[in-house]
Image (tube, rainbow, N blue to C red):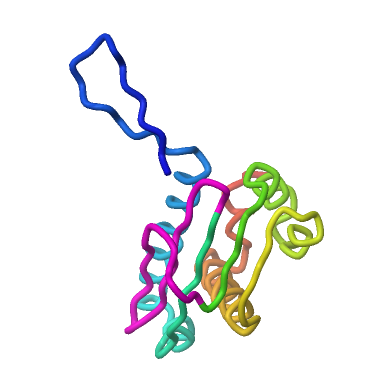
C-alpha cells in the first residue's frame, strides 16, 4: 500500500507516495502492453503468435503487484493481483534485478540463479512470453535494417 504524506504547512490534500519500484513496474508493463498491441498490427508473424492467446501474468515486487493480461485479441495491464494467474514472476530484489538485466540482457536465467526473482506457474506461459519478446526483437531488428536496434542508437 502506498504511504500518504501530508505537508502540515499547506492546505493541500495528501498525495500518495508510490514506491519507485512500483512506478517502474507499472511503467515497464504499460510500455510492453502498448508495444505488443502496436506490434500485432505491424508484424503478421507477431499477430499470428498473439491471436487466440489467453493468459494472465502477475509481476510483483515487495511493494507492488501488476497483472499483464492477454485475451480477446488485446494485451492490457492492470493494477493489483489476478485471482488465478497462469504465471507469476516475483522480483525479490528490484534494484539488483535491474542492474543484472542492464549488465547482461541476454541472460535472464542468471536472475533466478542469483535469487533476484522467483517464478511459479506453468512453464509453457513463460516460454510463450519469451517467444513474444523474441519476435518483437526480431521485428525491430528487421525494421532497423539488420543492425540490432540497441547498436543503431550508439554511434561508432
- Residue 23's quadrant in the figure? top left
Q: Residue furthest top?
A: 9
Give the vertical position of 107 relative to 101 (above or below). below
User: Is 106 on the left-hand or right-hand side of 81?
Assistant: right
In magenta, the rendered stretch is 61-85
Residue 114 lies in what quarter of the image? bottom right
- Specify the principal SS of the magenta part: strand
Task: Please state which of residues 37 and 137 is positioned toward the viewer in this rendering.
Answer: 37
Where is residue 130? Give x, y as percent. Answer: 61, 74
Residue at figure coordinates x 70%, y 44% from the top left: 96
- Residue 45 % position (x, y): 48, 85
Query: Horizontal and vertical percent for residue 128?
Result: 58, 81
Q: Position of residue 46 (x, y in %)?
A: 47, 81
Specify the quadrant that holds the C terminus.
top right
Q: Residue at x 72, y 62 (%)?
A: 108
Drawn side of residue 45 relative to residue 114, left or right: left
Q: Nearer the viewer, residue 28 or 79?
A: 79
The residue nearer to you, when weighing 112 against 121, is 121
Above/below status of 20 relative to 123:
above
Q: Nearer the viewer, residue 18 or 101?
A: 18
Please identify the quadrant where the N terminus is shown: top left
Q: Is residue 127 magenta?
A: no
Q: Tell me what residue is drawn at x 43 percent, y 50 percent.
A: 27
Amino acid at each position: 500500500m502506498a504511504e500518504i504524506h501530508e505537508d502540515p504547512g499547506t492546505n493541500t490534500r495528501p498525495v500518495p507516495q508510490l514506491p519507485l519500484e512500483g512506478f517502474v513496474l507499472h511503467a515497464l508493463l504499460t510500455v510492453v502492453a502498448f508495444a505488443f498491441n502496436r506490434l500485432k498490427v505491424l508484424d503478421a508473424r507477431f499477430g499470428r503468435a498473439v491471436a487466440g492467446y489467453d493468459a494472465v501474468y502477475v509481476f510483483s515486487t515487495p511493494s507492488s503487484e501488476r497483472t499483464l493480461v492477454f485475451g480477446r485479441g488485446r494485451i492490457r495491464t492492470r493494477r493489483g493481483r489476478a485471482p488465478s494467474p497462469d504465471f507469476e514472476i516475483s522480483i525479490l530484489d528490484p534494484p539488483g534485478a535491474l542492474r543484472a538485466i542492464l549488465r547482461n540482457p541476454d541472460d535472464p536465467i542468471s536472475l533466478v540463479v542469483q535469487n533476484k526473482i522467483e517464478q511459479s506457474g506453468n512453464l509453457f506461459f513463460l516460454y510463450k512470453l519469451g517467444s513474444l519478446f523474441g519476435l518483437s526483437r526480431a521485428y525491430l531488428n528487421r525494421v532497423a535494417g539488420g543492425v540490432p536496434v540497441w547498436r543503431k542508437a550508439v554511434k561508432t
